[in-house]
Image (cartoon, rainbow, N blue to C red):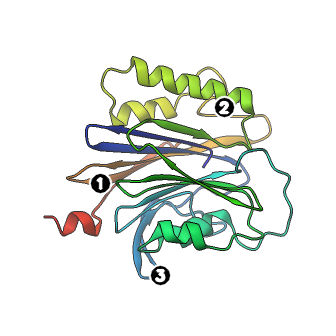
Amino acid sequence: MCTVSYISRQGRCFITSNRDEHISRPIALEPGEQIVNSVKLLFPKDPQAGGTWFAINEFGVVAVLLNGAFVNHERKLPYVRSRGLILLDVIANSEPQVVLQTMELKQVEPFTLVLYDGADLLELRWDGEKKHLKQLDAGKDHIWSSVTLYDDEAIARRESLFDEFISTTKEITESKIVDFHSNNHQDFENGFVIDRNTGLKTFSVTQMVLDQDQMAMQHFDLLNDRKYYIPFSPKTLETSK
């Protein structure tokens, strides 16, 4: 939930996320399908709060969460609902875009949510007082870094590494993107895989690959060196077959 990239190439879309957490937090459960509000979802579940930072629904919509909005905010406890459950509120609906615009977020900690529905790429930043909804170009590459863990200089450095990866990689594939996300780039403080003295570590890399014929989620548990591959068939694919 602390690094997210979006890459689109020749009808294929790759959405990849790194989850950075303190070692005191439990490891997420293996990704699996679950029915939430009568909608089929696929996501890795946070056993502590019950939410998630990465999910796809049966309509082929993907939502990914990052902590913080524009700046590293000061926490104002108590919060009424976790951000991981907010993501499930959005994605467990047939019209997630409508939910983004209408849902009440008062007393919810600031976050950034990236939503992709196969055509539109949206970014919602909630700064604790106001929603900032922005439509992005789904034909371009994008990267986000959580402002709660990375300052402006580190974010700029990460964007530069991403741009370099895009420009120097002849053929973008899911494995090459995962390798990029799984590299500390000689920087355990601000690389894509962190291991800070404070106990903050990169727990996992999760990726959704979407194309016209199939969709699949890959989840790499970096702490236990485990890999999961889960095919997924949204209704949009099932009805077209």
Residue drawn at 29 percent across, 65 percent down: 234
Q: Is residue 214 left or right of residue 81?
A: left
- Given the image, on which type of amino acid does mark 1 rest? Met
- Residue found at the far top of this picture: 168
Which numbered dot is residue 179?
Answer: none
Residue placed under numbered mark 1 in the picture: 215
Mark pair 1, 3: CA separation: 22 Å
44 relative to 153, above or below: below
CB within 8 Å, label 3 to label 2: no
Q: Earlier in the sequence, mark 1 or mark 3?
A: 3
Disc 3 target residue: 37
Look at the image and tell me whether residue 190 can be seen: no
- Residue 155, numbered circle: 2
Q: Is residue 145 positioned above or below 206 on the image?
A: above
Q: Is residue 29 above or below residue 170?
A: below
Labels 2 & 1 near each other (Cβ < 8 A): no
- Helix, strand or loop at mark 3: loop
Q: CA distance from mark 2 to mark 1?
A: 30 Å
Amino acid of disc 3: Asn
Q: Position of residue 75 (x, y in %)?
A: 84, 57
